[in-house]
Image (cartoon, helix red, strand yellow):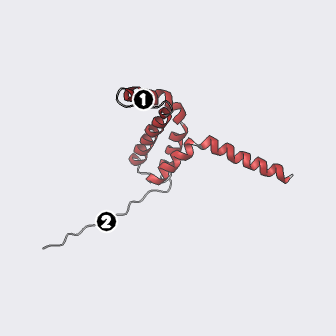
Amino acid sequence: MQALDIEVTERKILPERSMLGFIIAVIAGFLTPQLEGPVGAPIVKAMEGHIPVESVEKRLIAFMIAMLIAGVAAAFLNSGTPFWVILGGILGYFGTRLFEAGKKAVDERNGSAD
């Protein structure tokens, strides 16, 4: 039998494009509340005829759609990994709350130092 020569190539991501998927996911996570009405509502309406959907799940559905779009964009642009896309989406979704919590912690620290 003849041995097959298989060449394994390493996937290289250019440094300037490596975080593009992360940035896209941050934006998608941040825009989730704005997508809830135009994207989440029609999907929930279509699903309600087949399965019960809670009203609070509309935002979750909008987040899933936003992350799906971010994942496809990251794959299409060959940038980032699933880990960074997921982390970016989470940070984008909770970004304003995380920023406010950090700001409050800094203000409390500065206030107690005086």
Q: Quadrant of the N terminus?
A: bottom left
Q: Which x, y percent locates residue 34?
A: 53, 31
Above or below: residue 80 compared with residue 55: below
Q: Is residue 4 above or below residue 114?
A: below
Q: Name the residue furthest left.
A: 1
Q: Amino acid at mark 2?
A: Val
Residue 109, relative to residue 73: is it above or below? Answer: below
The quadrant holding residue 46 is top left
Q: Position of residue 15 (x, y in %)?
A: 49, 57
Tell me the number on the disc at residue 44.
1
Mark 1 and mark 2 residues within 8 Å of each other at the beta carbon: no
The percent position of residue 14, horizontal first and vertical second, equals: 46, 56
Amino acid type indicated by mark 1 = Val
Q: Name the residue tied to disc 2.
A: 8
**Residue 23 visible (yes or no):** no
Q: Secondary structure at mark 1?
A: helix
The residue lying at 58 percent from left, 43 percent from top is 94
